[in-house]
Image: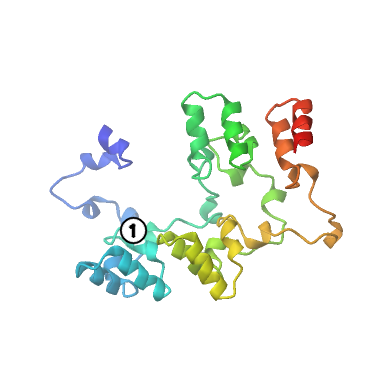
Amino acid sequence: KHAMARDKMDPSILDLDPEKSLKSQLKPTEVQGSGDDDPPLKEDPKYEKYYKMLKMGLPKDAVKHAMVRDQQDPSILDLDPEKTLKSQQKPKEGEDGNDGPPLKDDPKYVKYYKMLKMGLPKEAAKHAMARDKMDPSILDLDPEKSLKSQLKPTEVQGSGDDDPPLKEDPKYEKYYKMLKMGLPKDAVKHAMVRDQQDPSILDLDPEKTLKSQQKPKEGEDGNDGPPLKDDPKYVKYYKMLKMGLPKEAAKHAMARD
């Protein structure tokens, strides 16, 4: 049971009858009521032919390439073919009260929490975050809660930005799928230029919308530029101050630059 818990499996399974199937021993409410009557992926009419290709011995990458060509999500092949797609899909952010993983498990920040777990001082981890152009104040939040749940409503809503994140934006989705398949970024950028798209899009955060990462034009809506602490020209000096460096040291760095 300890090994099962370690592998993130339900240890209570070992209390069931090993001669019977799991499904036959679950309560009806655990089997039904999920609204998922779809076939397993390998029998799903939408994906069946790709699993047949794999069965014929075609390399997974070749089959994924065929899926991209057919405008299907190639990451489907990394899922369990014995389960339905629905049962393996994560609910979208905000659905069922899910606003993302706790900070300590968030792929974006997990390595910094590992640093703390290893005994590194918080300031050292914050310094690493500043170096990686991440907001070091994240480490002052509750690691057991998601980032979104700890942001002020005005930081999450009210921006009038209801667009999907870039990686799910119909205009750019296929390019992120190419990256997911392992194509070099330069090759994907070349494809974007060929399609008359802006290749610099791939340098933005795929988890955020395009709108949220675009700088408003000077003077628009009374906006005469970002606050100094967020100004790309000066941001690193304010980060130095945030990390606890003396103001004189930051001034010296500015004079040096």
Q: Is residue 223 visible?
A: yes
Which quadrant, please, contains the N terminus? Answer: top left
Q: Nearer the viewer, residue 158 or 69?
A: 69
Reply above or below: 130 against 93.
Answer: above
- Which kind of residue does numbered mark 1 sit on? Asp
Q: Quadrant of residue 41?
A: bottom left
Reply above or below: 65 against 212.
Answer: below
* 34 displayed left or right of 197: left
Q: Nearer the viewer, residue 34 or 248?
A: 248
Q: Where is mark 1, residue-wise?
A: 78
Describe the element under mark 1 as helix, strand or loop. Answer: helix
The residue positioned 55% from the left and 68% from the top of the image is 172
* 173 displayed left or right of 49: right
Q: Nearer the viewer, residue 49 or 129?
A: 129
The residue positioned 56% from the left and 67% from the top of the image is 169
Q: Residue 189, image x and y in percent?
A: 53, 65
The residue positioned 85% from the left and 60% from the top of the image is 219
Colour scheme in use: rainbow
Reply above or below: 178 against 233.
Answer: below
